[in-house]
Image (cartoon, grey):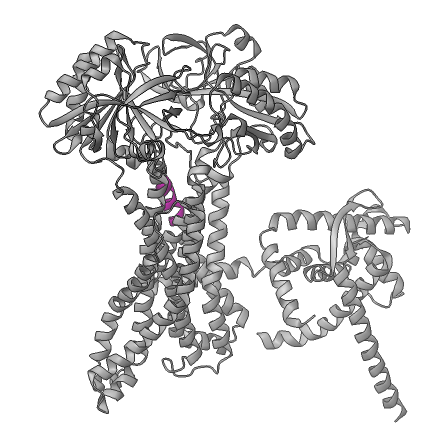
Amino acid sequence: MSKGKSGELKRSEVLQGTLDLMILKTLDAMGPLHGYGIARRIEQVSEDVLQLNEGTVYTSLLRLQQQGWISSAWGASENNRRARFYSITKAGRKQLLEETENWERISGVIARVLRTGGAK
Amino acid sequence: MTPVWRRLRELFARIAGSFRRRNFDAGFDEEIRTHLALLAERFAREGMSPDEAARAARRQFGGVTQLKNELWDRSRFGSFEALVQDSRYAIRQFRKSPLFAIAIVLTLALGIGANTAIFSVLQAVMLRSLPVRNPGQLVELLQKYPGEPRGNGYWTEASYLHFCKNNTVFSGIIGFSWDRLLHARTEHGVQRIITGEYVTANYFDVLGVQPALGRLIGPEDVRLGSPVAVVSWAYWKSELNGDPNAVGERIHLQKELVTVIGVAPHTFVGPFPELPTDVWLPKTPSRQAGIGLMARLKPGVTIDQARTEMAVLYQFTIRERAARSSDPLVWKLKVEVALARNGLNLARDRIGKPLLVLMCTVGLLLLIMCLNIAALLLARGAAREREFAVRVGMGASRGRLVRQVLTESLLLSISGTLIGVMLAYRGTAALETLLASGRIAQQMSLRIHPDWHTLQFAIGTALLVGLLFGIAPAWNAVRQGAAPALREAGTSTGRSTRLFGKTLVAAQVALSMLLLSTGALFVANLWNLEHAYLGFERDHILVVTLDQAANGYTGLRIYHDYQEVLTRVTAMPGVRSASFCAPAPLSGAGAAGFVNVEGYQERPSDKRWIEISHAAPDYFRTMGIPVLRGRAFTSRDQSDGRTVIINETFKRRYFAGRDPIAKRITLYHVTLDPEPKSYEVIGVVADAHYSEIREQANGGVYLPAFHDGFMNANNLVIRTNDNPEHLIRDVRVLVEQVMGGRVPVRRITTLNAQIDASIVPERLIAMLSGFFAGLGALLVGIGIYALLAYSVARRTKEIGIRVALGATVGQVRRMVLGDTISVVLAGLVAGAPLAIAGRRLALRLMQDLTVQSVAPIVVGGVGLILIALVASYIPLRRASGAHPLQALRHE
């Protein structure tokens, strides 16, 4: 049972990691936001390339919160409903910095690999 | 951040999250509703109809229920189904070896029960605040001689008024005096001795207490001195049958008739939590007794500001006292302002430190129990290696195994806790009885009920303990999980597991040595106190306390009544002699004064308090106090009444090298008689203890009890031939016959019982720490037994082979015993410094311990060695009986 799942898990983990990173970056850049705001921001930045069920955002938010990278507090939304606002913590900023470096390094490597591959 | 750390973070978050289902639901629902609404609004703005917009929003969001389930699964520690499964499995495991499970649960029940019981006493004594408004603002005003441990709180009305009028730091000062020996009877009830508190007009107002029924005492009642009373909840329940119409009922109080105007709330028992008040009465200025003072700090005022101001205001009291008293130490008095959040808690002074020591003791006991259980689980875990290996082989994750093992430990610890809390209820009842066995009017009647705090404590302990003793087996499970599956069971136990098991036992030995040696210290202390020579023969003495003041009956009549009592008691069979005295020996009461001695000069500041007692003829013979010089009182001394007998310390101080007989001394009897009087010394007696067992030898004088036709003593002491308890009934009947009810008997007790009542804290700590030490030692015995039995069982094959190869029984025994001895020795070596530190701590906490030697530590060590020998007897027999063939077939 564990075998069958792991293939899926790995694929989604890549995606999850990406989403986590995007959310951290969003919160870092925009300050406290609620889930809807985060979804809008990602939609806007990715120019609709990244289509996702917006509920997935909450899975990420929970994970980030469990790691202590973001924190949340209740506040009022634009339409005056109660909404949970998430903000990045100090540990979260540190994590973001590390992950960004990682990401840049890896994407650089991949880009190079792809380029040399193409040249052949 | 390392992955392991990440996993841990997540684990903690999940464990915390597991308890928040309701929060989770509400939070999630609201958050998602907002999200969907915002999304729908956006679509609506783009021109969709509201229905369409809502649908589109849901589509874009994805499945809500699915998401919710996923999030909930991620936010907690395992699913409920898995928990049920784990528990079922655990219970099946326990049913396979019920004795094992029962032993663990009982061990835990004892440990947690003991901890909960002691904690609830500690909580009641040390932590519980007065049930009044803002108890943190309350302070107590005391005056203190230098060097006194605790000041006294007796103030005059004039001082009270002076402070009220001139202070700027308190929002209110309340005054109260109390009488713990009031005779009270409701219209239809029986006579009882109760505690009455006389309170100032602002008492209830400043404390912020609201009545449960009727009203409380207010300014009018005090101004008019109305015969009204507020009764306590307990008194209302027991004496007024909890009648909702009790307001207006009347109570005969001493010679007065007072009307009940209200009932206090059930939490409020007055300023002394352990000495509850039964009735509150208006304090009238005519009551001359000293009053206790408590004050409420104004908001924002610190206690230091209050101290500074009180130091100034206190000068009034000093001048007032100096004007009235010949006490030369008056000028050394200081005022003290102490926090009174917990009330005027005398119990805290008396048993606070013993309780702390006991709390440490039971904490250690619990630790020993955890180690013991961990060792047992470990031994059993070794037997389960195969099971774990199979489960790993079938695909169980390590996390799942750990959860299984932890579920088992928690299940054990929770069952243990349930039984433990029940034990704690029984235990606290017993402790209440023990605490209430103190002296009359000092008996601590604490309401020790395990409450919410205690429950929190118990639950916390259960979880902690479960995790603590679960860690070892869990860790082992993880390691086992990693081990190659399905190795031969019974041979795969690593050296490290065995070493770990030995370490657990050695740690138990070390902790147990600490417990045993401190336990022995306290038991020896109690023994010393119970057998100390107090200056008189303490056995075979009956003390009858008469309530002279009950009917305001004095003078010649009483004088003759007492004489007749003496004559008739002395004539009773079984009575050797009888006499009167005051105060009763070792009752905690005393009278004192100052003295001027002919031919002895001293500066006023060097003056010492002198104990003043009254004694009738035959007193010294009855008590067995040797007369060293001169003579004892005779009936002649009763008429002229100007004679005095001094004790040895008095003689040494004031008559060094001189013969005191026929010399004159002048006595300033501070408490009884304002005028100094001159007396002639007729005798010298040996020192004896007056009010306490632990007091230093004091200078003391005895005056005649019968004197100028007055009677200054109300305690009849009787020396009997055998057990004085047999005479209690006859003596009571006789005294009541002679007195005809004019002077009631307040109490009859043996002198030994009276002494026992004065060392309740010592007995408390000796009994309990002795008991717990014994329990700890027993556990260590079990631990050693289990370790040995386990290792012998494991090594049956090896032993068999050794025997087959020609090893003698002696060699086998030595081999097995060698293990135990090394473990016990390691434990003792580690335990010795612990025991020494424990002894030092005990000596520091309990300053007047009578035991100074290190003998108790030796006792602890030797005791443990004996226990180890006893515990290893059976496994040793089994090992040496191992037959080679049997051993080989064993596989």
- Whether residue B475 is situated above or below residue B679 in the rendered picture: below
- Whether residue B517 is situated above or below residue B688 in the rendered picture: below
| Residues shaded magenta | B419-429
Left or right placement of residue A104 versus residue B593 in this view: right
Q: Position of residue B480 (x, y in %)?
A: 47, 76
- Whether residue B259 is situated above or below residue A46 in the rendered picture: above
Q: Is residue B784 magenta?
A: no
Residue B546: which quarter of the image?
A: top left
**Image quadrant where one finds the C terminus of chain B:** bottom left
Left or right placement of residue A3 versus residue B230 in this view: right
Number of numbered labels in the structure image:
0
**Image quadrant where one finds the N terminus of chain B:** bottom right
> Does residue B81 show up?
yes
- Whether residue B834 is situated above or below residue A80 in the rendered picture: below
Left or right placement of residue B269 versus residue A24 in this view: left
Q: Position of residue B671 (x, y in %)?
A: 41, 20
For this rendering, which residue is in front, B619 or B419? B619
Residue B515: which quarter of the image?
A: bottom left
Q: Position of residue B115 (x, y in %)?
A: 42, 49
For this rendering, which residue is in front, B432 or B165? B165
> Does residue B200 show up?
no
Question: Residue at (47%, 35%) from the top-left corner?
Answer: B148
Q: Position of residue A60 (x, y in %)?
A: 73, 62
- The extreme top residue here reads B224
Q: Is residue B424 magenta?
A: yes
For this rendering, which residue is in front, B706 or B569? B706
For this rendering, which residue is in front, A52 or B267? B267
> What secondary structure characterizes most of the magenta part?
helix
Question: Residue at (33%, 57%) from the top-left corner?
Answer: B856
